[in-house]
Image (spheres, rainbow, N blue to C red):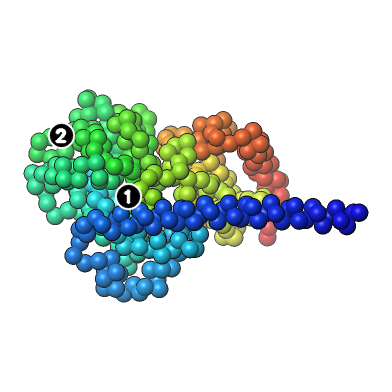
Amino acid sequence: MEDRRDIMMSMFKANGANAETNKDDKYYKQLKNDLDARVKQLEKLPAMHDVSLKETLKNEGINRRDFMKWATAACAMLSLPAGFVPTVAKAAELADRLPIIWLHMAECTGCSESLLRSANPSIDSLIFDHISLEYHETLMAASGWQAEQNLENAMHKYKGKYVLMVEGGIPMNNQGEFLTIGGHGKKGVEIANAAANDAAAIFAIGTCSSFGGVQAAAPNPTGAVSMSEATGKNVINVPGCPPSEKNIVGTLLHFLLYGTLPALDAYNRPQWAYKRRVHDQCERRGHFDAGEFVEQYGDHGAKEGYCLYKVGCKGPYTFNNCSKNKFNQGTSWPIQAGFGCMGCSEPDFWDTMGVVGEPLKDRLYHTTFGGLGADATADKIGMGVLTLTAVGIAAHATIAAIKPPKE
């Protein structure tokens, strides 16, 4: 009887698994059809470049195989199965069908630099070069009244169809007069609102545009605020100081594929890029779990690649995928180079993350725990786990403090 019961239970579980598999198959089949239909819609739109992306890649020495590898990685980044690779590749090739207006507000242009400053152009930067960039103050040849006219023409010609990307915070004090642009002396907040009113989608590129950034740090004399606060519009935040080029292009690629905005966290960041903590994906996480910490820069722990928490790393309460994407064409990232995370993709990081070289002993998970961050929708079990994790950090720090130093 027991054998028969076990067999029946196994059959029941197998049937349940098959039902789930069939459900997933139907979902992805329908999604594939929807995305293919979206690509066909893009194909009907006029190309805005004489040279196709295929030709551009070929001219830069990037073959089809490398491009398909990139599309495969993009699929994984967007949590799509391998069967979607041809669709993703096709959507990227049609990137020039989507007009882009890129505004610079109060910022340092670091976000544009992240995307464009590569010794050897990456596929991400080439795709960005290929899009129909109707206005970008740093890159465009026009200046003065011609530049202003280009912006007005683009907003009028592609009304309701263009994607607005904004870099930099928006000063609001003195009626916004801390930032005036062009010969007509238009205020930054006026330009931002005018462009936002007729945009199909709005992306805040970098922490300054997403949350105010360094410009909004106390005492914030210019009254700098985020793009969403300045305009009252629904804005997709792609924070980082700067964000990686993959997060910028990936967010754009998502809009190309779906024609809709991505799933967002509590801070309107795309979940596919900002769902997990830097701490959870960190290459030094094993040392954290073992209670092995760098006590000061240059010590034995620093040479051995130990965890940087005790010298101020904010990875445990920062949500970003830096450890997977890295910077400088995937060469490295701050923690790999031996410097702790500053939490630059979090709201008000300049003020709330405290001293760069010291851990936040009295404010663990300050920006997320308690329902203020990406864990706002977590259930009670998840919040309990966060509590235990916070306790674990304190315990590890104590253990490390009493462990005898290695010779």
Report which quarter residue 188 is drawn in: top left
Q: Indicate the amino acid at tag 1.
A: Cys
Q: Secondary structure at mark 2?
A: strand
Q: Position of residue 327 (x, y in %)?
A: 41, 58
Residue at horizontal 51 percent and vertical 45 percent from the top: 275
Residue beneath disc 2: 186
Report which quarter residue 151 is drawn in: top left
Q: Is residue 247 above or below residue 343?
A: below
**In this view of the protein, can residue 318 be seen by the observer?**
yes
Residue at horizontal 47 percent and vertical 36 percent from the top: 266
Report whether 257 appears left or right of 160. right
Q: Earlier in the sequence, mark 1 or mark 2?
A: 1
In the picture as drawn, the residue positioned furthest to the right comes out as 1
Q: Is residue 62 above or below residue 316?
A: below
Residue beneath disc 1: 111
Mark 1 surroundings: few (<14), some (14-19) or many (≥20) residues within 10 A: many
Residue at horizontal 47 percent and vertical 49 percent from the top: 272
Q: Indicate the amino acid at tag 2.
A: Lys
